Amino acid sequence: MKNCYGLILAAGEGKRMKSKHPKVLHSICGKPMLDHVTGALKASGIEDYIVVIGHGGEIVKEHLGENVKTTCQREQLGTGHAVMCCKDFLSDKTGTVIVLAGDVPLINSETISNMLEFHNKNKFSATVLTAQVDEPQGFGRIVRNSAGDIEKIVEHKDATEEEKNIKEVNSGTYCFDIKQLNGALLQIKNNNLQQEYYLTDAIEILKSAGHKVGAYKTCYSELMEIEQSSGRYTVPSVAMGVNSRIQLQEASEIMRKRINLKHMNNGVTFIDANGVYIDDTVVIDRDTVIYPGVMLEGNTRIGEDCIIGSDTRIVNSIIEDGVHITASHIHNSHVKCNAHIGPFAYIRPDSVIGSNVKIGDFVEIKKAVIGDGTKVSHLTYIGDSEVGKNCNFGCGTVVVNYNGSSKFKTIIGDNSFIGCNSNLISPVEVGNNAYIAAGSTITDNVPAGALAVARARQVNKEGWVEKKGIWNK
Ligand code: UD1
Ligand code: CA
């Protein structure tokens, strides 16, 4: 967007999190809070922005990467001081700057855009995003005059008893005319209870100098229906600051509902969305059905017409169309069309499960490619392997890929049949159309089309029990 810039304040320590990690890097639905804020800013069309870092600054900077501008606030002397640290960024710019807090992760692009429109339409030099709340404890209060216009913002700690009764609060999100803001910053003092330079004082400073300032109250169309109807939340989500683990979980709950609602609107069925946890980063195509107790995380993509059954966890994986998964874990893997997995299967990283494959109960696959149409129905381990198409694994097959120090590879050709309770001692190759007799321990390669039997022959000792005198009469 032309002449519109962003500032994100993320230098605070976040003492109440009781964490060794910077507050803004705590995750909500699989993404650090800070990324939700930058995401909302970018979605509203603002590409040029700077992040004020301080506490844990190096880690935050590393997380943001080289392409994001940052400025360091060495001492956290308040939100006004944090904005002063962006002097260089602002000095050559004119237009509007949006100021956001890195710990208000539920801010969304719709709210930012509406606030900006309100700001521009009224030609304000500053606009603050406000919210009507039931419990204003801790927030800055919006003091309006008899005409209903905003006069100033008073911090909770500095408020009089009368001001403490005000239930319209500062969300910590603002629009400023850059030139006016630069002027106001020069006048902000720290003569308050916390001896901090409050950004909120810019409102009173601009107002007293005769500039027009505004307060844009969050409207309910910007909030989710679930949030309005639940009656559980005392603060509208776009103003919800996360300062503690309790607030982190509350914000996660709302974000989770937003995400599930988005998928429902895109044509995904949920049997009961309450117990489904889907990261913000996950993509799901239409007509897929999600059962309760499912967790979909990271860069996961799920195709059309899949059934993701209860107690399934999928992390950073691609699941193609028509796949059925029940009560299984899949990590960093690729499952192709119409495969059936589970219950109780564990697909470990770097596995590729071919189309129409069946992976049954208590099967573990690790770093293995399973060819199309192959069946691995129960109680089997396949690691570091390449398995061909249309093979059948009997119950209890083990690929013995590890000798205690190194891992070895197993290659199995198309259409081969691995009998129950076989061990394949790697490295080993089984050719196409080969058969392995049940109970075999395979140590040598098996040629294509051969039957390998690798077990001792059965010996029956007639009358042995009676001779021993242990026959049970
Ligand atoms: C601030 C507002 C308050 C508002 C509330 C909304 C001020 C003075 N008060 O209070 O009116 O109701 O947010 O959540 O602005 N930060 C820095 N450097 C600093 C101080 C803070 O970068 O020196 C960052 C923090 O990392 C955080 C944000 O600014 O992301 C807000 O700071 P915080 O200390 O949490 O302010 P509040 O007391 O919540
Ligand atoms: Ca805060």
Image (spheres, rainbow, N blue to C red):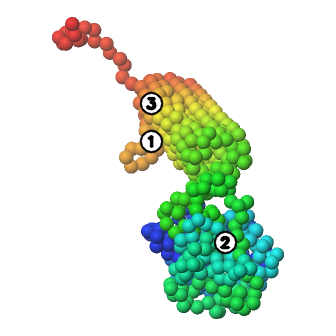
Q: Earlier in the sequence, mark 3 or mark 1?
A: 3
Q: CA distance from mark 3 to mark 2?
A: 63 Å
**In x, y percent, where is residue 96?**
75, 79
Q: CA distance from mark 2 to mark 1?
A: 61 Å
Q: Quadrant of the C terminus?
A: top left
Helix, strand, or loop for circle 3? loop
Q: Which residue is mark 3?
A: 396
Residue type highlighted by circle 1: Asn
Helix, strand or loop under label 1? loop
Q: Which residue is mark 1?
A: 401
Between marks 3 and 2 in the image, the one whose residue lies nearer the viewer: 2
Instruction: Name the kind of residue labelled 3 in the image.
Output: Gly
Query: What distance separates the C-alpha of mark 3 from that of mark 1?
Result: 15 Å
Q: Earlier in the sequence, mark 3 or mark 2?
A: 2
Q: Give the number of the disc on residue 59.
A: none
- The residue tagged with tag 2: helix, strand or loop? strand
Q: Nearer the viewer, residue 247 or 59?
A: 247
**381 lies left or right of 162:** left
Q: Residue at x 55, y 81 (%)?
A: 159
Q: Residues within 10 Å of mark 3 (few under 14, many from 20)?
A: many
Picture layout, residue 261 above or below residue 86:
above
Depth order, front residue of 6/394 = 6
> Going by the image, does 216 lie left or right of 166?
right
Q: Are marks 3 and 1 in contact (CB under 8 Å)?
A: no
